[in-house]
Image: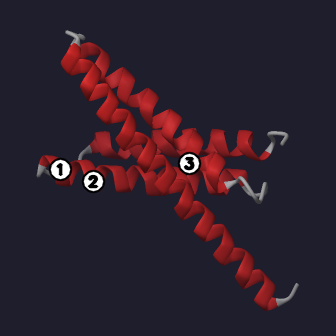
Amino acid sequence: MNKHLTKTKNNEALVNILKGSFVAISISLISILIFAFVIKLTNLSDKFIPIVNQIIKIISIFFGVLSATKYNKTKGLVKGVSVALIYTILSFVIFATLSKSFPISFAFFYDILFGMIIGAICGIFAVNLKK
């Protein structure tokens, strides 16, 4: 295969992965703002917050992976894991910056692992979706 063509395809894949990661971050930020508004209006129990946060992460990763695989339905596993990894790290940095604390712990590493597993599943699913 032509060396230039391979480099172009790799650059295109990287751009799609980055776009997917930013789609996922955008969905998370909007969803969390909406959820915070719902919490403010209602007296929702604190026990629901971690559950809803995980659901928001799953939905965000799913749509990010869909975005990353939209035009090139190959390497879903790799794209899914990549989108999820970038998304998880970016979201950690964004929310840690907002809260002015960087609590790196085992929970962060479990969050990365969880995200990558979800990303892998979503990537496999996304490349096998019919148009």
The three-letter amino acid code for the residue at tag 2 is Ile
| Residue ID for mark 2 | 94
- Which label's residue is closer to the chain start, 3 or 2? 3
Kindly report the distance in space between the C-alpha atoms of the residues bearing marks 1 and 3: 22 Å
Residue ID at (59%, 69%): 15
The three-letter amino acid code for the residue at tag 3 is Gly
Residue ID at (58%, 42%): 63
Disc 2 and disc 1 in contact, CB within 8 angstroms: yes
Kindly report the distance in space between the C-alpha atoms of the residues bearing marks 3 and 2: 17 Å
In x, y percent, where is residue 10? Answer: 68, 75
Location of the C terminus by quadrant is: top right
Q: Quadrant of residue 54?
A: top left
Location of the N terminus by quadrant is: bottom right
Crowd around label 2: few <14 · some 14–19 · many ≥20 (10 Å):
some
| Residue ID for mark 3 | 64
| Residue ID for mark 1 | 98
- Which label's residue is closer to the chain start, 1 or 3? 3
Residue ID at (62%, 63%): 16
The three-letter amino acid code for the residue at tag 1 is Leu
Disc 3 and disc 2 in contact, CB within 8 angstroms: no
